[in-house]
Amino acid sequence: MPDRKKLETLFETHGFFDYRWIEPASIVVAQWVRMKCLYGCPDYGKSAVCPPNTPTVDECARFFREYKTAAVFHFEKAVDKPEDRRDWSRGINLRLLDMEREVFLGGHVKAFLMFMDTCAACAACSGSRSDCKDPKRARPSADAMAVDVYSTVLRAGYPIEVLADYKKTMNRYAFLLVE
Ligand code: SF4
């Protein structure tokens, strides 16, 4: 059992205060999420950490079953222009990566982060795992791992809704699988 108090101090040292512990078994994995990636997402095949460059839905479900402790991190933001989302996401994802590394170095060898948005580390993503320009830091988002983020965060008591207007406040979520 991880020392949650110690981890909470670490999360907060990195500036993350809005998080909740969840049971990894409560993470909802669904085939429909992958279908949304396959059909309708303009980024399909263009990111090295999105489908088809992610495990199958069954493999994702199996992966989550290997964990007993996880935390979900909540971020909210309204942007003036759709393109502003990228810089905001990039900044948070890089900070989350620093936190993941410290959790790992603290002895949690299985620590694995799922970004709160698609990896935006590079101005233009390579689109393939083998050509990823920063493979050490690239991580998938939860939806790229077939997570039904809506159902999962609602179970955790967090808000989420479909936004018809990009100017409305987004609720986005990152996940840290601990052990
Ligand atoms: S590090 Fe760069 S190339 Fe790799 S997944 Fe992220 S944006 Fe794409």
Image (spheres, rainbow, N blue to C red):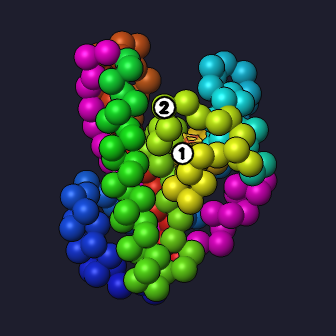
Cα–Cα gap, marks 1 and 2 = 17 Å
Q: Quadrant of ligand 1?
A: top right
| Image mark count | 2
Q: Position of residue 148 (x, y in %)?
A: 57, 42
Give the SS element for disc 1: loop
- Residue at the image point whose x is 40% and y is 83% from the top: 106
Quadrant assignment, res 68: bottom right
Amino acid type, residue under disc 2 in the picture: Ala
- Residue at the image point whose x is 25% and y is 16% from the top: 80
Quadrant assignment, res 11: bottom left
Magenta span includes 95:
no
Residue 141 shows which numbered tag? Answer: 1
Q: Position of residue 45 (x, y in %)?
A: 71, 30
Residue 123 shows which numbered tag? Answer: 2
Give the SS element for disc 2: loop
Q: Earlier in the sequence, mark 1 or mark 2?
A: 2
Query: Which region shows up in magenta?
Result: 57-81
**Residue 112 seen in the current view:** yes
Q: How many C-alpha atoms fall within 10 Å of the one at disc 1: few (<14), some, or many (≥20)?
A: many
As drawn, 120 above or below 139: above
- Residue at the image point whose x is 46% and y is 62% from the top: 176
Q: Position of residue 145 (x, y in %)?
A: 64, 48
Q: How many C-alpha atoms fall within 10 Å of the one at disc 2: few (<14), some, or many (≥20)?
A: few
